[in-house]
């Protein structure tokens, strides 16, 4: 299983760009789990992780367009890409 941590800004970004990019279109299909402390996360199976991995790396618009490198979502997806084996 792969876990991607989210915050409200992450959810807003996913919803804003949704179908424009492959990675956001995929993430928009998941309902995040809300933890007791209010944090949110998406859990991906290994098969789903490879689909998201390919979507991020093969997007014609470049690496994670529309995301600030300082955002939690960008950092989580960057770490995700480096953790998929």
Image (spheres, rainbow, N blue to C red):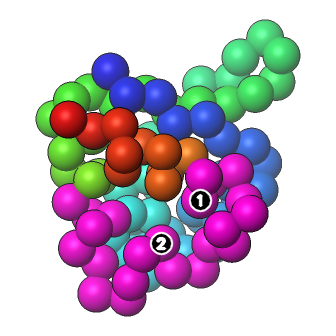
Q: Find residue 41 and report its horizontal and vertical position in percent.
A: 59, 31
Helix, strand or loop at label 1? It is helix
Q: Find residue 35 and report its horizontal and vertical position in percent.
A: 71, 17
Q: Identify the residue position indicated by label 1 in the image.
A: 74
Q: Is residue 58 above or below residue 11?
A: below
Specify whether residue 20 is painted magenta.
no
Q: Residues within 10 Å of mark 2 (few under 14, many from 20)?
A: many
Residue extending furthest right?
Answer: 37
Q: Identify the residue position indicated by label 2 in the image.
A: 64
Q: Residues within 10 Å of mark 1 (few under 14, many from 20)?
A: some
Q: Is residue 61 left or right of residue 8?
A: left
Magenta span dominant secondary structure? loop
Q: Residue at x 19, y 45 (%)?
A: 50
Residue extending furthest front?
Answer: 82
Q: Is residue 81 left or right of residue 66?
A: left
Q: Is residue 25 above or below residue 66?
A: above
Q: Is residue 39 left or right of residue 77?
A: right
Q: Earlier in the sequence, mark 2 or mark 1?
A: 2
User: Mark on residue 55?
Assistant: none
Q: Residue at x 35, y 37 (%)?
A: 83
Q: Find residue 1 and report its horizontal and vertical position in percent.
A: 32, 21
Helix, strand or loop at label 2? It is loop
Specify whether residue 63 is painted magenta.
yes
Q: Is residue 75 left or right of residue 65?
A: right
Residue 48 visible here:
no
Q: Residue at x 42, y 43 (%)?
A: 80
Residue extending furthest top?
Answer: 36
Please state, as top left, top right, bottom left or bottom right, where the C terminus lies in the image. Answer: top left
**What stretch of residues is rendered in magenta?**
54-75
Q: Is residue 9 above or below residue 22?
A: above
């Amino acid at each position: 299983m792969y876990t991607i941590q989210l915050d409200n800004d992450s959810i807003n970004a996913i919803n804003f760009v949704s179908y424009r990019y492959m990675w956001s279109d995929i993430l928009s299909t998941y309902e995040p789990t809300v933890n007791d402390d209010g944090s949110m996360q998406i859990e991906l199976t290994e098969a789903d992780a490879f689909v998201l991995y390919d979507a991020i790396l093969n997007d014609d618009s470049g690496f994670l367009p529309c995301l600030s490198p300082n955002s939690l979502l960008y950092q989580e997806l960057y770490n995700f890409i480096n953790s998929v084996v």
